[in-house]
Image (spheres, rainbow, N blue to C red):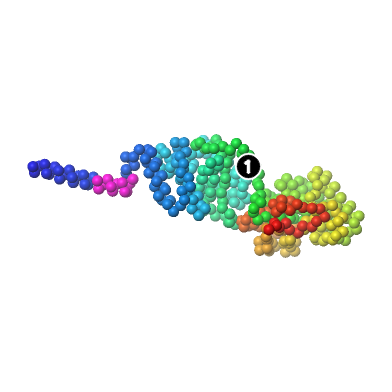
Amino acid sequence: MFMKNAWLKGFFLAFFFLTLSFAYLKEKTNFTGILLTKEERVDKKVNDIIKENQDKMLEVQKKFDDKFVYLEFLKDDVVYSYYVNTTSGEITDFSFYIRPEKQEDFNKKITELLYLKYPVFIADALNNETVKKTYQIRENELVIYFNDVTIEPMPTEKLFLTVNYNEIKDCLDFTFLLDSEYQNEDGYVYDPNKKTVALTFDDGPSGEKTNQIVSLLEQNKAHATFFMVGNKMNYGASTIQNVLAKGNEIGSHSYSHTSMKRQKKANLLADEEKTHEIYRNITGQELLFTRPPYGAINSTVKESLDTIFITWNLDTEDWLHRDKEYIVNYVLENVHDGDIILMHDSYDSTVNAVAELLPKLYAEGYQVVSVSELAKITNHPLEKHTIYRSLKRSQ
Ligand SMILES: [Zn+2]
């Protein structure tokens, strides 16, 4: 009897301590994991993640093949994503589902698309392994968000890259939907909803300075309209070709930069035809617009020349100030949607101002384009014998 009682006591004591230590282990080490099936372990992890993200909206919970469970949350317009591996029941990086032998191709494609979408100053900052990324798996595309990145100047817009699965179809190690109508991303497209200004340069072609500006425009996803002087065109023929090759456009700035108002009609017509003839011989194209020197125009000039007249509403007076800081600040303080900005590609101070101004305008949400592109975006059909100072959107 006594023995039996002692046995019983020992048994209960052992049971009590076992239960206690089991509860302790469960709390501290997730020890129960080994007692769960693979599916239960994944479910538990998924539920834990959902619990941790209770302050956010659960947008997607989807299993991809038998590889991972994708969880996507949204809060204050920010996407949070998780990948729970169905074998380990652990959270993995997105890179786990890129074929290892295709990792380099994947990175190359992302780099290519970054430089296609963004100006160089932004693409350089984003194209960096240390930048934290969130990968959002959408039906037909992958969206990559870039978090906590510092760029100078810092753009106000959200930084992300949309990658259609057609671009990376060989790289991904899970089943996804392929758009059949997808066209390769092969060029930069301006956004009609963004604030837009036309940048114009007079008095060229000016050789190296013009070419430097063309490079800066290219690096910043920008275009401009160059108003060139007829008697400088032959000397600057290769510069003219370069301006056009990079998506910019060219108008006439008279033959010899004399005021059109002071010319006799016959001289005016002859000079303008001479300028057109020279340009035609160099490019095989027509000059698109005319900008009279000094903006000096009267009704005789307007009626005589069979052309569209483009002047400006934002004059940087770069020829007078020759000061980078002045030009940059003047534009940033006065710029508005639909403006036509006047500069001259003849001064180093203007080249330096353009180098600083283009990233700053981009960061403030402006796209910088040619006059034709601005007219298209703001819905202005341009007509001959008409003067345009700016191209504002109608309200
Ligand atoms: Zn001029």
In depth, the one of 284 and 339 nearer the eye is: 339
Left or right relative to 86: residue 175: right
Magenta span of residues: 19-30
Secondary element type, mark 1:
loop
Residue found at the far left of this picture: 1
Q: Residues within 10 Å of mark 1 (few under 14, many from 20)?
A: few
Instruction: Return the x and y of residue 194 as percentages of the image width and height.
Output: 64, 54
Q: Position of residue 238 (x, y in %)?
A: 77, 46
Label 1 CB sits under 8 Å from any ligand 1 atom: no
The picture quadrant where one finds residue 89 is top left
Question: Residue at the front extreme?
Answer: 395
Q: Is residue 6 magenta?
A: no
Q: How many marks?
A: 1
Q: Is residue 98 left or right of residue 374?
A: left
State the residue in front, 334 or 390.
390
Q: Is residue 190 visible?
A: yes
Tell me which residue sits at (80%, 56%) in the image.
Answer: 386
Q: Position of residue 44 (x, y in %)?
A: 38, 44
Q: Is residue 207 visible?
A: no
- Asked whether 334 or 191 is in front, the reply is 191
Image quarter where the N terminus lies is: top left
Picture quarter with the C terminus:
bottom right
According to the image, label 1 marks what residue? 185
Q: Residue 91, percent across and down? A: 43, 44
235 horizontally vs 362: left or right: right
Q: Amino acid at mark 1?
A: Glu
- Residue at 26% over, 47% down: 21
Say which residue appears at 44% left-offset and 36% top-offset: 66
Q: Is residue 235 above or below residue 263?
A: above
The residue that appears at 83% across and 44% down in the rendered structure is 281
Which SS type dominates the magenta stretch? helix
